[in-house]
Image (spheres, grey):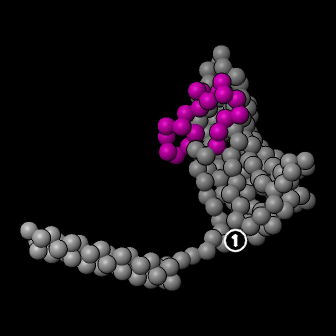
């Protein structure tokens, strides 16, 4: 019995050494060949599902169930508009936004058109700057393109996109790029 136990332990030791060696070698190879550094010039496309309602009461009126968009499903008894906040991911805290695009669907025509505001917030939250775009007064899918001309961007601060939408309006996705 003692011999069987020693043989079993020896097999387990050899298997353990082989497994650790394989994992270590695999990590070295993957680290050398497969690593990529996130670059500030990367474009990021995020679904509107990352946006959260500002007012907890409207959370239940937001439909997050379709992977294509979020929709404000209010009735005439509910608030006329809903506001959501959407995060912007920064790779370089000293970099500037090259562009921001927000894809929306206006389903109310000239009434209660979706509009979005890009906010730049200083590191101590003591200063802000913003730029607002509004969808055209016609039904359909539109891209809000922010020019960001004269837009103050604070080093080490953060960005947030705030969007307001009317009943039945949809937010689809947004894209950002840093320079």
| Identity of the residue furthest to the left in this view | 1
| Identity of the residue furthest to the front in this view | 2
Which quadrant is home to the N terminus? Answer: bottom left
Residue visible at 67% across and 35% down in the picture: 53
Residue visible at 63% across and 71% down in the picture: 38
Residue 34 visible to an observer of this rendering = yes
Give the quadrant of residue 98: bottom right
Task: Sort mark 1 into few (<14), some (14-19) or many (20+) by Cα contacts within 10 Å.
Answer: some
x, y percent for residue 69: 56, 43
57 within the magenta span? yes
Which secondary structure lies at badge 1? loop
Residue 165 visible to an observer of this rendering = no
Q: Is residue 169 above or below residue 2?
A: above
Q: Is residue 100 above or below residue 65?
A: below
x, y percent for residue 57: 66, 24
| Identity of the residue furthest to the top in this view | 77
Give the tally of numbered discs: 1
x, y percent for residue 30: 46, 79
Drawn side of residue 66 relative to residue 116, left or right: left
Residue visible at 63% across and 35% down in the picture: 169
Magenta part of the chain:
51-70
Which quadrant is home to the C terminus? Answer: bottom right
Foreground of the two, 69 or 52: 52
Foreground of the two, 179 or 100: 179
Q: Is residue 39 above or below residue 159?
A: below
Residue visible at 15% across and 69% down in the picture: 5
61 within the magenta span? yes
Residue named by callout 1: 41
């Amino acid at each position: 019995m003692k011999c069987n136990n020693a043989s079993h332990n020896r097999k387990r030791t050899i298997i353990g050494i082989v497994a650790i060696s394989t994992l270590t070698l695999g990590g070295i190879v993957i680290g050398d060949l497969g690593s990529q550094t996130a670059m500030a010039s990367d474009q990021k496309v995020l679904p509107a599902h990352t946006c959260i309602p500002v007012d907890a009461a409207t959370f239940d009126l937001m439909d997050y169930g379709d992977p294509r968009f979020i929709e404000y499903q209010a009735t005439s008894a509910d608030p006329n508009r809903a506001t959501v906040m959407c995060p912007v991911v920064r790779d370089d805290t000293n970099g500037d936004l090259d562009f921001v695009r927000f894809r929306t669907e206006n389903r109310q025509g000239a009434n209660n058109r979706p509009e979005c505001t890009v906010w730049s917030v200083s590191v101590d939250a003591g200063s802000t700057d913003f730029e607002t775009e509004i969808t055209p007064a016609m039904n359909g899918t539109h891209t809000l393109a922010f020019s960001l001309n004269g837009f103050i961007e604070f080093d080490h601060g953060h960005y947030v996109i705030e969007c307001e939408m009317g009943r039945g309006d949809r937010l689809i996705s947004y894209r950002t790029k840093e320079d």
